[in-house]
Image: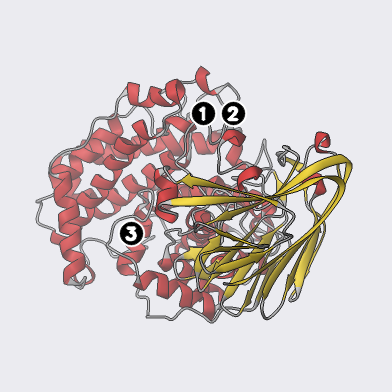
Amino acid sequence: MFREYLNRHDLGALLSAPGGFAPFPRRQQRARWEALDGQTRRELIAWGDEALCGYPMVTATQFLAFSRTGDRQAFERPYFARRRLLMGAVLAECLLDDGAHMDAVVDGLWCIMEETAWVVSAHNGSDHPGALPMNRRPLPDEANPYVDLFSAQTAATLAYTLYFLEDKLNAVSPLIARRVRAQLERRVITPFMTHDDFWWMGMIRRDVCNWTPWILSNILTVALLTERDAVRMAQIVERALRMLDSYLAVMPADGGCDEGAAYFNVAGAALLDCLEAVYEATDGRVSFYGEPLIANIGAFPLRAHIDGAYYLNFADCDAMPALDGARIWRYGQRTGNEALCSLGAHIHAGRRGVRPLDTPQMNRVLHALFDPIPGGEVPAPQPFMALPDLQVFAWRRGGLYVALKGGHNAESHNHNDVGSFVVYADGEPQIVDMGNMVYTAKTFGPERYTLPNTRSRNHNVPLIGETEQAAGRERAARDVSAGERGASMDIAAAYPPEAGVRSLVRELTVSEMGFAIADCAELSRAQEVTWVFMLRSRPELLEGEVRAGKLALRHDPALLRGVEEMPVTDERMQRNFPGSLFRLTLTAAPDTRHRQAFIITRS
């Protein structure tokens, strides 16, 4: 898409001159800053005052913790704290314009520029293209800077600091801004322009993910805010757009994000940030919002929305993600999707405070401050939702909601969950996906599928004997079909050969009373089959029926039942499912053929 456009158009002739990119009101535009409401002003000042107390240390041993113990947080907590404090100091100074927070701004800039590298320990890829084992690269190489998510995001924060406060920094010393520009060039822009071997660029690997738009959106910001040479600015923007095609190449036509709705802020919304940067830098002359794929990517949160704060959370996804309503609203506005606008406006209206929702990304805070977003109601839900390329489908009947996934077991942030489903009643979780956990070295390493939230045994899919589903692109659903009355898929290929599964057809049927899940399995040898249901509430076992929360689940009385309480101890999972989850198992005696149906209704 972007390559074709660039091959036909002179982007340099369409871009504003260096210094002309002004996505937010400058500090000198006092009316816009002084128009911020009283509560917002108080929050910004309090945030800036925190920076007056100083910045935390960032040490080598904190960085080493990842390679030594797998702990990411030891380094990331102080690393992100520095950037949040700098952002608070910058915004408070812009708001008051009285010099009270300038020393905190200078100290924050100096601390960050003194860091050996801007990458986080889990992303340390100085050994381009990152092929060595984790424990072989415990510290970053200052002479060989790598561009990861957060080095790019840090660079954008510093670029915004210059955008708002360069004149005041020069009044302290011209060396400050000069050094900031030099560090932006050395750590981010030069590596970006001279390397083709960073995996997220899509040149040495095709399996890119949110890294590509997330990094590129920040690089575009840096280039458009700080580059003084028009020709080079155009070259940077053009290179970024050509790389962005590698992200579109892995996106399904339906716009579904296999990383889940919780990643939309840094996936689809990061793509929006790229498109908006080019749109604004060309005064709207370069727009890609009419492309169907672009529109579908933006609509994903609307399709993944269950009710209230809950969204589909297959893969490493929170059930209650902190979505950026301002970006969703803008995406809806640009693509003419009124329902998406309404969802974004509703989310934005419920935003608490001015601080970043997740990682400290400056432009998200600024959009929340300065984008005028009207109020909105949650759009009416649709009785049937289909993402046929992603193979995710959802139905609503009588206050019940069920979503079923096919797909494969090599998706981004994959869980081994082909054929899994979730059920909600009156917008409340009943049969759930565990979702995400705090990231450690295991999360993206060879021990990933030892984690409880990624294994198929803790998803709503069968166990064949004791054999779980396996990871891999070939572990996929086959013969997938879906419509308003239900869906069918063969999930046999999700299991490894030793499971001996010849076929395992899962059918979901929809009625006005509820839903039915029916599995028909043909095995090469007689084995038990255990059906797993991850419940949000403690189940009550009755004759041929299980009641849990607002659901009743009817089953063959001959099945052997078991219940395991799973206290939720992980900090991240606790935000979505505090207390305990309950793993219900229903086991059939050994046989080569199994057919079981489970009827799910309101209790």
Mark 1 falls on what kind of element?
A: loop
Look at label 3 and name its amino acid. Val
x, y percent for residue 227 = 40, 47
Mark 3 falls on what kind of element?
A: helix
Look at label 1 and name its amino acid. Gly
Compare marks 3 and 2 and give the one earlier in the sequence.
2
x, y percent for residue 418 = 71, 51
Left or right of residue 164: residue 432: right
Task: Kindly tell me whether residue 115 is visible in this rendering.
Answer: yes
Asked whether disc 1 touches disc 2, contact meaning CB atoms under 8 Å apart, the reply is yes
| Residue with the mark numbered 3 | 365
Mark 2 falls on what kind of element?
A: loop
The residue lying at 43 percent from left, 23 percent from top is 69
| Residue with the mark numbered 2 | 129
Asked whether disc 3 touches disc 2, contact meaning CB atoms under 8 Å apart, the reply is no
x, y percent for residue 94 = 19, 58
